[in-house]
Image: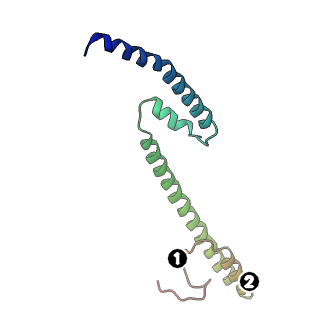
Amino acid sequence: MHPSTTYPRLLIANSKIPLRRQQLSSSLSSLSIASSTLPTSLPPEIIEYIDQGRNPDIYNRELVEALQRSNQFLKGKSEAFAGFRDMLAEEIIKAKPEAEAEVKSIVEGTRAVEVPQLNGAVTGEATSH
């Protein structure tokens, strides 16, 4: 290419740079304004993980594992209370047989989670030990 034809092309290219820079700046400004209206709330722990150079997936995995442990604990606690409820109902029925229908009604009304029965006295089923 001849040097005399290259110079005008450089002038044309250089004159487009400020315009392109202005368009880019305008686009980034619009993007920044639009992004401020998006719901993007992240837990501070995830931001800390990223700031420390750690993978946020590790945070998610640890969180899920902690929730699973908590759910197992609460399930065990719920089952223990249900067992206590059933044993208490059995003892009340033994002590006051005339209250059996009412006790069974209360037990059935408080049965949120089906748990194995300790003994058939509450539901009327016979169990073998």
Q: Position of residue 24 (x, y in %)?
A: 51, 26
Residue 102, image x, y percentages: 74, 83
Q: Residue at x 56, y 39 (%)?
A: 43
- Residue at mark 2 to residue at mark 1: CA–CA distance: 21 Å
Mark 2 burial class by Cα count in 10 Å: few <14, some 14-19, many 20+:
few
Q: Amino acid at mark 2?
A: Glu
Q: Nearer the viewer, residue 83 or 73?
A: 73
Amino acid on which disc 1 is placed? Pro
* Residue at image coords 62%, 33%: 33
Q: Work out whether mark 2 precedes mark 1 in sequence or the reverse, and give the earlier one.
A: 2
Q: Where does residue 56 sit, x and y in percent of width and height?
A: 45, 40
- Left or right for 35, reference 98: left
Q: Quadrant of the N terminus?
A: top left
Q: Residue at x 61, y 43 (%)?
A: 39
Residue drawn at (55%, 81%), measured in percent from left and top? 119
Q: Which mark is residue 116?
A: 1
Which residue has dot 2 on it?
Answer: 102
The one nearer the camera, 84 or 34, is 34
**SS class, disc 2:** helix
State the image quarter where residue 4 is shown.
top left
Q: Is residue 24 above or below residue 18?
A: below
